[in-house]
Amino acid sequence: MKEKPTKQEKIQANNLIEEVTEILGPCVKCGMCKSNCPVFKTIREESISPRGHSISLLNKKLEESLFDCTLCKSCERNCPLGIKICDSITKAREALSLKKKNTKQNEEMLKNLEETGNPFGNNPPKGEELFCC
Ligand code: SF4
Ligand code: SF4
């Protein structure tokens, strides 16, 4: 059975959602943040653009597509209001995690880390190696 959030986790998640709303509150939905977003440039869907995330989050909708963001901050460089879009996305992801709405891949990675200390587990895919910068 799927794990349910505790009362404390629900409170923490709601507090994070309030913080997200405060960060994005000044957004005027101009779309200037979209032009350099690598994810939007590849997938071409408004909902996964930084403006799309902003609109969804201001409506208190936490979509799984938040995990598609690379946190590269290109959007922040183009925002005329200096909105910290990445901060809002990381907080929203944390809220999703507290609400036990992690993606399947994240769940698997966490389980692997707990059990083996390796995000790929004991049987990493062939040809995949992790390098430290
Ligand atoms: S550039 Fe800034 S103000 Fe404009 S839509 Fe993006 S986040 Fe909102
Ligand atoms: S931080 Fe996320 S939303 Fe912003 S430009 Fe990069 S991928 Fe796009």
Image: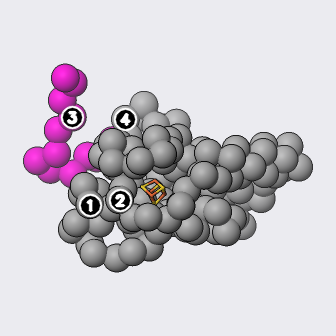
Q: Which mark is residue 130?
A: 3
Label 2 or label 4, whichever comes before in sequence order: 2
Secondary structure of the residue carrying tag 1 is loop
Q: Is residue 104 visible?
A: no
Instruction: Evaluate if marks 2 and 1 touch, with contact meaning CB atoms under 8 Å apart.
Output: yes
* Total tally of numbered discs in the picture: 4
Kindly identify which residue carries mark 4.
118
Q: Earlier in the sequence, mark 4 or mark 1?
A: 1
Magenta: predominant secondary structure element? loop
Identify the residue position indicated by label 1 in the image: 35
Q: CA distance from mark 3 to mark 2?
A: 35 Å
Residue 133: quadrant of the picture: top left
Q: Is mark 2 within 8 Å of ligand 1?
A: yes
Q: Nearer the viewer, mark 2 or mark 4?
A: 2
Mark sitting earlier along the chain (3/2): 2
Q: Secondary structure at mark 3?
A: loop
Span shown in magenta: 122-133
Rounded to the nearest angstrom, the CA distance separating label 4 from label 3 is 10 Å
Q: Nearer the viewer, mark 4 or mark 3?
A: 3
Between disc 3 and disc 2, the foreground one is 2
The CA span between labels 2 and 1 is 6 Å
Between disc 4 and disc 1, the foreground one is 1
